[in-house]
Image: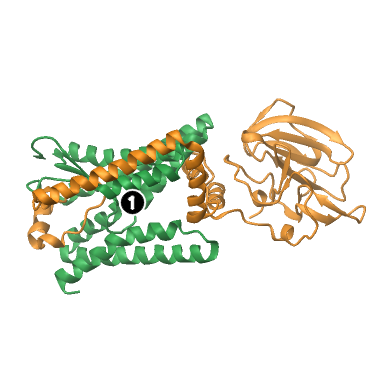
Chain colours: A orange, B green
Amino acid sequence: MPAKHYRAAQRALPRQSVPPRAAGTGARRADSEERKTPRGEKRRLAQLLISAIILLSAVVCKVTMPGITEQYRQDVLRLLGQDADFTAAFAAVGQAVAPGGQVGEALNDAYVAVFGAREDERILSIVEPLPEKTEPLQQILRFAYAAPLQGELTDRFGYRTDPISGETAFHYGVDLAADEGTPIQSFAAGTVTVVAESAELGKYVMVEHPNGFVSLYAHCAAAGVKPGQTVTLGEEIAQVGQTGRTTGPHLHFELHQQDVYLNPVYYVSR
Amino acid sequence: MCRAEGKTKLYVSPLSLVLLGAFILISSPLMLCAVLQAAVLHELGHWLALLLHGARPAELRITAFGAEMLLDSRCRLSYGTELAAVAAGPLVNLLFAVLLGAAGRYWEADTLYLFSGAHLVLGLFNLLPAAALDGGRMLWLAVSYLFHPYAADRACAIASAAVSALLITGGAVMLVRGGRCFLLLAALGLSFPSVKELGLVKRQHGG
């Protein structure tokens, strides 16, 4: 540590040139308050009393009239930052510094919380109303996640011309093209709830994550997990295939929150 | 040793109470707890560092711009000691951010992530090299030690003005493009001591 002494700085500087101190630092001198007069002190005490009453009133209002204060709170928050959700933003930032945390994803969540959801341009260009229980805007997941595989995004969430029937239909997930046999990794930590096969989805796996989120992986060649099995983020759960209604090997990936279909594009593409 | 005689005095500015009241009204109880615990632990970090160096604040001032600890005028701290005391607050915040983040991951608890985030935001914000923030004081101490206190005054004033200008510009852009004014309000609050600092330097050193 430097041996030079603070006293030197004190001597070199005129008294007022010592800059205001940072919160909590120790160098500002307490004797700067010696110019108090009894009248000034009285006025300060009166101001303090009024401020204390305002503070107490705020606490009393908050406790005894939660409905009214909540309404005003929402009005003020709208004025300050529209729909900025600072609680979610702080929580996302906290996730970023947690050991093993994924900084990019967490900061993305923080961005969404403060600045609002980014919008998938393709969804916005669609004239038709969205089907019920679909959410095109980005949601804050509040858990660590990663794309199930690195593949080309060949189809997005939203209306599209069905490659088999040629008709316009809503696509409830995203398609990621990859070679047959490419490992599919769990989107996040969770519990496998379904391992099944259907004509539409082929072999598919569903994994339940925290906060009511569920991920679905379809058209798999084979599943490597069983229902009830706990999986970690990035753990291999299946391989890419072309089972079910498909025109080539790819992963059809869906993300649900309770019974609402979310747009997974925000979480799988960079 | 520069232990203050008697008890540490407490000064609370009236405006700080009004701002606290406003914060209570507009924030959720959880957010209030998260911010307050981060602020209290930040100050305890400074306090503990001072105690470890045998110094005890003569006065704790809580103002609209945060809290500050004042030492007795006879108490002289070396650059190193003061730097350690100043850095202790943000360091405590960063330490708790990691610890609470790890606990949040272990117990999958959003509340712990929120508390961790509050520590991280407060710690990093305080490291900004602006007047009235720990980062500004650290910059002042470093430049003063390496060059001269006059140079430190100027460096601190310039850095404060630059940080304030950046934040105000960012806040204005955010207000115009997204209708969100919270950053602009925070930036204006922060620029207050920065302007004061610039004025002081101008008066003392002739610009």
Q: Quadrant of the N terminus of chain B?
A: top left
Answer yes or no: is residue A250 visible.
yes
Residue A123 picture location, percent across and down? 73, 57
**Given the current orientation, which residue lies at the most extreme right position?**
A165
Q: Residue at x 23, y 45 (%)?
A: A48
Q: Residue at x 81, y 55 (%)?
A: A159
Residue B42's image quarter?
A: top left
Answer yes or no: is residue A5 visible.
no
Residue A14 picture location, percent across and down? 10, 63
Q: Nearer the viewer, residue A33 or A199?
A: A33
Left or right of B94: which side holds B28? right
- Image height of A27 relative to B37, above or below: below
Residue B28 picture location, percent across and down? 47, 40
**Given the current orientation, which residue lies at the most extreme top position?**
A228
Left or right of B170: which side holds A21? left
Q: Secondary structure at mark 1?
A: helix
Q: Residue at x 91, y 52 (%)?
A: A164
Q: Quadrant of the C terminus of chain B?
A: bottom left
Tag 1, which chain?
B
- Which residue lies under the disc numbered 1? B126
